[in-house]
Image (tube, rainbow, N blue to C red):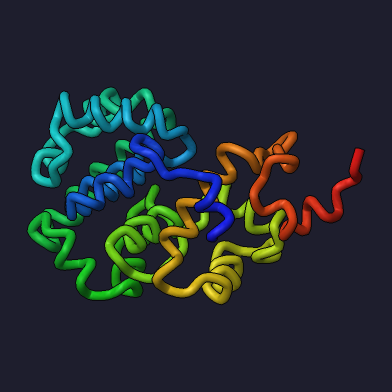
Amino acid sequence: MEKLKQELRIEQGDFIAYELAQTKDYFRTLIATIISQNTNEKNTYRAFGELERRIGVECAKLSQTDVQKIAEAIKPAGLYAQKSQAIKSLALFLMENYGCQIELLLKQGPEKVKEELGKIRGIGSKTIDVLLANYGYPVLPIDTHVKRTSIRIGLAPPGSYEKMQAHLHKVFSPEKRLEAHLYLIKLGRTLCLPRNPKCNVCPVSALCCYYKNKPQK
């Protein structure tokens, strides 16, 4: 982590969910995380902005909005049909069960949050973990970048989401897990690319199993 933090910077515009969580509005944090699924951060910001402008990113408003209107607003992010249904279902669920107060659910602990939100189609383990981590629970969400960089470096072997997370939780102390999530994603976006990773300028290449086993030119 020290080597990554020396070379990489978390900047404004890198992580919409993280930025929204700083305002303590965890409903908006979760909506942004749903929108961000399988898309880049630039399009996530665009789609979230359109949803805010056209409807308003508020539980009560979204629970009463036709799902097609939600889909039209978030089109820039792609997969808008399934994401809009997840957003609508989430808003209805929170309205009916928690009076739109997502904090009432979050205060019940990670397992309860996973149990409840996991029932909603389109909200999976990674999305829930991003919410939990940004709320302050000591979990390390695993997206495609975290998975790739962790396997390459040797922090965790390939496996299921749960097994990889268990390994990473042994590597990173509870207070460092959100930070590790952010920096491993930043590493994966900028240097540890799926194809042609920039190993020669990577700050952790000396620690990396992939680099050590890579044929040197």
Quarter placement of the N terminus: bottom right
**Nearer to me, 50 or 196:** 196
**Nearer to me, 214 or 58:** 214
Residue 89 can be seen, yes or no: no
- Residue 199 is left or right of residue 163, and the answer is right
For residue 202, which quarter of the picture? top right
Can you give x and y, in whole percent of width and height, for residue 185 in the image? 52, 47
Residue 59 can be seen, yes or no: yes
Q: Which residue is pictured at 27% across the width and 62% down the height?
A: 135
Q: Which residue is pictured at 43% across the width and 41% down the height?
A: 37
Can you give x and y, in whole percent of width and height, for residue 147 in the image? 60, 54
- Residue 8 is left or right of residue 149, and the answer is left
Residue 170 lies, with reference to residue 12, above or below; the image says below
**Nearer to me, 65 or 173:** 173
Q: Which residue is pictured at 63% across the width and 39% down the height?
A: 191
Can you give x and y, in whole percent of width and height, for residue 7 in the image? 55, 46
Quarter placement of the C terminus: top right
Residue 103 lies, with reference to residue 62, above or below; the image says below
